[in-house]
Each structure stands twice: as structure tokens, then as C-alpha cells.
Amino acid sequence: MSETTETTYKPTSPNSKLDFASVWEYDPAPESTANVKVKERYELFIDGKFVKPSKGRYFPSTNPATKEVITEFAEATQNDIDQAVKAARKAFKNEWSSLSGKTRGKYLYRIARMLQERAREFAILESMDGGKPIRESRDVDIPLVAAHFFYYAGWADKLEYAFPGKTPEPIGVCGQIIPWNFPLLMLAWKIAPALACGNTVVLKPAETTSLTALKFAELVQDAGLPSGVVNIVTGAGQTGAEIVNHKDIDKIAFTGSTGVGKLIQKSIAGTGKKFTLELGGKGAMIIFEDAPVDQAVEGIINAIFFNQGHVCCAGSRLLVQEGIVDQVIRKLQDRMEMLIVGDPLDKNTDVGAINSEAQFETVNKYLQIGLDEGADVYQSKCEIPENGYFIRPTLLTNVAQSNRVVQEEIFGPVLTVQTFRTADEAITKANNTQYGLAGGVWTDKGSKIFKVGAGLRSGVVWANTYNKFDPTSPFGGYKESGVGREGGLHGLAAYVNLR
Ligand code: ADP
């Protein structure tokens, strides 16, 4: 935008929605679901077969954009978890751990290729079950899922080179518990390195997004993976707890809330089980006055709104250097007005549905807390569907560092805005939460990137961008954001014992 346009910019008035609509409205472009088959009910995947849950209980799964029940999943209880662990142990002992790395790699490459072949189907299912825009599941989630399997397939026959001077050995049976924000991607983060290193797994997807994990189980069957190497059990928190407490599990890998992470750490204390925990976050994005502001605004929109803020490393706090705060807020509001909120299966949609009723209530609760704390609330004025769980992109300004909306993880499309004068102040404010998962810095100066990057107590710091992922990069948190790293060589190290 030229300087002239900049100075003649008029703030968005309450009635200007129509102006934006006339410029930005697209015709609907819904992705077809014609070739995607969802069964009425999914069983547990244990020892290479789909089996009924021992207590015969099932629970529904809802499309959060329509509130329609799309299928139901089996609830795994103690006996089922026991069967799954036994199958995983048998597969570990009798076959998988003693196969050559090359052969394990072949299976992983096969899975990666099959995921690519069925990418569109997985993307549609991910959007139907979890509410995320198809553009994101199609262009980000599923390609990254395949990339993780390719990457760790490549390591399977090179483990002896990964840890010079050490002999890596598989850990054994791994219990893996994942959340609902990136269902298949979190599965890939967990299963691909575990299998590459010779372990077997019992994985539990989140109760609101189990569909793609069970489709993945079908793919595992099609790939001819030996029975018991991958077991998928569905259920809610109690099912997860049964995995955590099972005596014959050697390692727990968990991604989810800090509260549950702490519970898990307590439960396994003293048992000798290994663990990695990837927990909550409250990522700060720091914009200096010398930053390319338009580029920064685009990055911020991407960092907090594109996946409804359903990202543990989401940039949910914005720290703007004082001199440009008005300009940044104006440009953000301007861009927010152009975001299309609605049907996750529409290819034009930027912001989809909040994942579940419970999460919808949580985000609304925090909006109320923000109001009570005295924040100024700006929401984009777009239409939202009446039926599903949708929340308009929201800015909270006039907030203080001690406010709950600044300190606590909201996990929704809500961005708080604060200001700073110096780099040291920005670093202090960014670090002043219980979390330390990710952060970002926008500036024209490499020296500031290094200063802020070194000062942030965050597992990841992005510079002049945000939310960029790659299977070769380790990911994980400081402080209450977690223990251990996933991805890259570090992610491999989390699945071996080194002798
Ligand atoms: P979120 O707030 O993101 O839903 P949770 O930590 O509640 O995060 O859930 C993440 C995963 O942990 C889900 O698969 C959930 O079923 C599981 N889970 C919830 N409670 C427990 C528990 N007490 N023990 C083990 N797993 C749990």
C-alpha cells in the first residue's frame, strides 16, 4: 500500500461490511465429499484387526460446522488397552524390533506414498471431523503427514549414523496420546519416528477427531504392516489414563493440555517409563518499527486466525513497538474484515469451525473474561453460519500483562495486543507466562532477530514468518510447555535407548 493510500485510509466503520463484501465475496466452492466413505461406526484397531470394544460402548463424533453426528467410535476400556499392549509387545518381540532398518523403512515409504495417493480423502475427512478449513488440511496437514513418514523412513536404515559412537536400540512399546488440533499430523509425529526406530505403538487419538486415525488404520492394513505394530484405540481421557498406567508400556508420548501433561507426569513418576510431553503455549509475536509491516500483518493473521487459533504454538499475543501500534492495529482490522469464516469444506474459507462445543464454550468464556478485565474487543463483522461452532476473529487491545487473557491459553481465534519500547521490554513481556513453546519476531535487522531469538525462552522462534513446519526441525517447549523434542534428529532420539 503506498504512503498516499496509507494516509487517506479510513478506519472501518460498522457499516462498511457491505463495501468489503462487494469486493471480496466469492461464490461458494465446496469440496465434494462424494468419493469419501464414512462408516456408521468404527471399531478398535488391535493386532491388525478391527475389533469390538469389550464393554460394547460407543460414542458419537460430530461435525462441528453443522453439529451433525457423522459416525461413532468405540470406547476402549482397560481390557482393550491390555489387548492392544499385548499385541504391540508380541509384534515388538517377534518381528518389528528385529527386522532390518531397510525393511522397516520400506514399510514407512509405502505408508507415505499411500498417504499421498489418498491425500484428498484424508484432507476432506480431517475437515469434516475437526472443522479446519479444507485449504489447510489439503495444503498443510496432509502433505506434512506424508513428509514425516518419508523423512523418518529415510532414517530407518541409517540409525547407526544418527548417533555417532553410540548404539541405538528401540525402547519397546510406546503409548501415544494425541490432541484434536492436527489429528493426522500429530499421529505422524508420533508413529513415524517410533516405527523407524523399531518400536511398536498403541495410539489414542482425541475423542472429537478420531476419524483419520481409523482411516490410517485401514491404510496400515493395506500396506501389509505386520499385525500389532500399530494399534489404534479410541476413547476419552479415561482411555488415555489406562494407556498411561499400563505396566507393560515403556514410553509415553503425549501432546495436549498442560493440565493433563502434569497428571501424566505424576502418574508415571518412579515407574521408569520414558516420556515426552508437548503441552500448551502462549506464543508472542514481536513486531519492531523497522519491520515490513504488511508482511508482518499477513504472518500474524496466519499465526492466529487460519486454524481458528487451534495451534499449541499459535501466536496468540502480539507485542508491537509503540511507534507503529496504530498502523498495525488498523491494518490487522482491515485484513480481518476480509477473512472468510464458515464452511470448512469450502475452498475459499480462511477460518473454519471451533473443534467442539466444549472448546467453543472455553473460547467464549475467555472473551467474557477479557471484557471483565477491561479489554477493548474488536471482532470482524463477517457473517457466520448459524448452526455450527464459529467464532469471529477477535482482537483484544487495552490488556495488561497480568490479565488472564494474556497469561492463559485460549486456543481460539483471539489475539491480544500489547506495546513495548525496547527489545529488552519485548523479551521480558514475551517470557512472562508459564509457557515457552514458540515465538516470532518481525524486523528488518538481523541483529534484533539474534537478540530476541536468544532472549526468548521458547522452543521455536520464527523470524519474519510464523507457523512454518518441517519434519527435519525439532519442536518442543520450555517451562510448562513440555519436556523433550519431536521432529528431526531430536525426535528420533526420543524413540531409542543409546548404549
Ligand atoms: P485439549 O484441552 O487440547 O483437549 P487434553 O489434554 O484434554 O487437551 O487432551 C489431549 C489428549 O489427552 C486427548 O486424546 C484426551 O483424550 C487425552 N486425555 C485427556 N485426559 C487424559 C488423562 N487424564 N490421561 C491421559 N490422557 C488424557
Image (cartoon, rainbow, N blue to C red):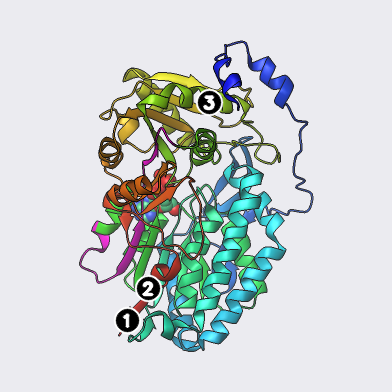
CA separation in Å, label 3 and label 2: 43 Å
Mark 3 vs mark 1, foreground winner is 3
Mark 3 residue crowding within 10 angstroms, few (<14) / some (14–19) / many (20+)? some
Residue, far left: 270
Residue 275 appears in view: yes
Q: Residue at 57% across / 85% down in the picture? A: 103
Q: Amino acid at mark 2?
A: Ala
Q: In the rendered structure, are the residues bearing label 1 and label 2 in contact, judged by CB atoms less than 8 Å apart?
A: yes
Rendered-image quadrant of the N terminus: top right
Please give the residue where the numbered disc 3 appears in the rendered image: 331
Residue 34 placed where, x, y %?
Answer: 79, 49
388 lies above or below 446: above
Residue 145 placed where, x, y %?
Answer: 57, 61
Segment tinted magenta in the rendering: 266-290
Q: Residue at 27% across / 58% down in the picture? A: 265
Please give the residue where the numbered disc 2 appears in the rendered image: 493
**Which of 285/377 is in front?**
285
Q: Is residue 89 magenta?
A: no
CA separation in Å, label 1 and label 2: 8 Å
Q: Amino acid at mark 3?
A: Lys
Residue 338 placed where, x, y %?
Answer: 63, 27
Mark 3 vs mark 2, foreground winner is 3
Q: In the rendered structure, are the residues bearing label 3 and label 2 in contact, judged by CB atoms less than 8 Å apart?
A: no
Residue 137 placed where, x, y %?
Answer: 62, 50
Q: Residue at 22% across / 63% down in the picture? A: 269
Mark found first going from the N terminus, 3 or 1: 3
SS at circle 3: helix
Q: Amino acid at mark 1?
A: Leu
Mark found first going from the N terminus, 3 or 2: 3
SS at circle 1: strand
Mark 1 residue crowding within 10 angstroms, few (<14) / some (14–19) / many (20+)? few
Please give the residue where the numbered disc 1 appears in the rendered image: 498
